[in-house]
Structures are given as structure tokens and as C-alpha cells.
Image (spheres, rainbow, N blue to C red):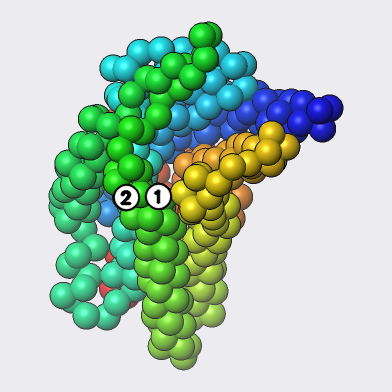
Amino acid sequence: MATIEILNLISQQLNIYWGSFMFIFGIIGAVWNIFIFRHHTLRSSSYCTYLLFGSIASLIQISFSLSDRIIDGGFQIHWTATSTLWCKVRYYVAQCASLNALSCLVFSAIDRFFSTCDEIKWRRLNSVFVAKRICLFTNLFWMILAIPTLIYPKSIQITSNQYACQNTSVIWGMIITFVFNLCCYGMFPWILMSLFGFLTWKNLCQIHHRRIGHTSSTIQTRKARIDDQLASMLYLQIIICILSSIPFCTQSVYYSLTQTIDKSAYRQAQEYLFLQIARLAFYFNYISMFYVNYLSSAIFRQISKEVRKNLFKRKEDLSRAVTMINHQEFNKQ
């Protein structure tokens, strides 16, 4: 049927062209984030620490997972499916990296809430010492939890010339669908980021009201602008995270519930197209961080330019904007 061939062709072209576009800009954004947040003037920021770890995890996720989607789903070269060892390693690394990147994004939202709190006991959690240990513990946690991914995926021969890397455990497949895909990639990040984003907004409103009448108009305007830009960076990332995850979570649950149903070739082609759209959309979680921050915040753009100019200088004070992104100093004022 011509319609089936058209749907399959659209799926293939999406992986080649849109996937390649996302891969290039994702690699550029992640690498540039790493250069920015590893600079010595930004290492005192706990928020930048989470973004640094998240950018490294995003770079690994894009390199291992999105590249394979382009080669396998786009160019129809099933090079990762012919080796059982590489099949296991690829799935394991991609799963750990994606969960770590998303966790760091959630922790950055929580960190911003802590930085706007009045209580000292909460502001103490807004530190690089705490951030590094949380990131390392989170990485270890996901590496242990994802160990079954090293066991159950295997290279399976579908036809005489086609291989596929598939999970061979029904129970582990259900866990991946309803625990990892639905909860860890979907509900938990949505709820936590939305909750702490709202709490951060409430704290910023209280800070803004306290400043009225106690500071000069110039300082008040500058600090209000900082608050607005930092908040917009957080809220835009929350929106992107939710919107990009909904198709992926929906597709995962749908496939798990309907995989035993006998489907026509036309329906399979439709579902395969939706699968490619959902998976490609999900990668916005990992490629958007740099571009969201750069487009939504003049402060971030200023810091990016100054870090670029002084990238290889070991002792250079960039500007007051460095302390703005940390949140800690201006909240104590």
C-alpha cells in the first residue's frame, strides 16, 4: 500500500533530517554549557554545578542514543543491533545518562527554591559541596537501579538480514514502561519542577515586596530584572520538559497496553511514525538547556560572552553578573 510506504518514508526522513539537526545543535549546546559552567568563576555556584553535571549527562545521552536513532531509524543501518554486548552497553549508558540529566534539571529547580528562602537551614543546602555530592549519589543510584538493563536486552534476529536490540524480560519491560518512562521521565519531574517553581515564584514575590521602600529605584529595578530573568529561565525549562515528555510517556504506555493486539500493516506504520515523533520530541529535554537560558536571559548571554573571552584565563573576575546567577549573595542583601 502506497500510504504505508509514505508513512514509513516520513518516519525515515524525520530521523535523518530532524534528528541530525537536533544532534548537531544538541552537541554544540551541551559542549558550550560544559565550557561555561566549568569556568573557575562559576564553580562557586551550586546552580551551575547542577547544570554542569546535567550538561555532561546530556552530551552522553545525545552521543549514545540520538546518534543511534539517526543511524538505525534514519539510514536503516542496524549496526548496534548485531552485537549483544554493544546492545546492552548502549541501552545502559543511554538510560543512566538520560535519568541523570533529568535529575540534575529537577535539582536545579530545587536549588533555586533554596536560594530564595529566608531560613538559614534551607540556604545551607544551596552550596557547591551539597550539589556535588547529590550529583555523585544520583549517578550511583541510577547506575545501580539500571543494572537489569545490562542483563535483559539482547540482539534478536527478526529476518535473515535484520536484527533488533530488544528487551527479553516481560517484567523488566513493564518496569521500564510504568516506573521509568511514566514516572521517572514523566510524572515525578513534572510534579517536582512545577512545585518548586511555584514555591520559588512565591519567595521571589515576597522578596520583591520587602525591597519596596528599602532600596533605591535603580537597585530595585536591577534586582527585579534579575529575579524575572532567573524565573523565566526556570519556567521555560519546566514547560519544555513537560511538553516534550508527554508524547514519549503516552507512546510508551500505549505500546505496552496494545502490544498483544493483532494490528494491520497500516496501523503499524501509523504507530511507528508516532513513535519516531515522540522519541525525537523527548530529546528536547537534553538539547534545550543552553538555548533556553541564552534566549530568555540577558544575564546569561552577558556571562556567556565574558566567559568566552576569558575562557582560558585562570585568574579573571568576569563581572557582577557571575554572582547574580548564583543567587546566594543577592538573597542575603
View extreme (bottom): residue: 213
Kindly indicate whether the residue at mark 2 contacts the one at mark 1 (C-beta within 8 angstroms): yes
172 or 86: which is nearer to us?
Answer: 172
What's the amino acid at mark 1?
Thr
Looking at the picture, does residue 95 appear above or below residue 141? Answer: above
Q: Secondary structure at mark 2?
A: helix
Task: Determine whether, in the image, residue 333 is placed left or right of residue 132.
Answer: right
Q: Residues within 10 Å of mark 2 (few under 14, many from 20)?
A: few
Quadrant for the C terminus in the image: bottom left
260 or 86: which is nearer to us?
Answer: 260
Looking at the picture, does residue 11 appear above or below residue 48? Answer: above
**Mark 2, residue position:** 175
Q: Position of residue 67 (x, y in %)?
A: 50, 24
**Mark 1, residue position:** 177
Q: Position of residue 8 (x, y in %)?
A: 71, 28
Q: Residue at x 49, y 19 (%)?
A: 158
Q: Residue at x 40, y 73 (%)?
A: 195
Quadrant for the N terminus in the image: top right
Tell me, yes or no, if residue 173 can be seen here.
yes
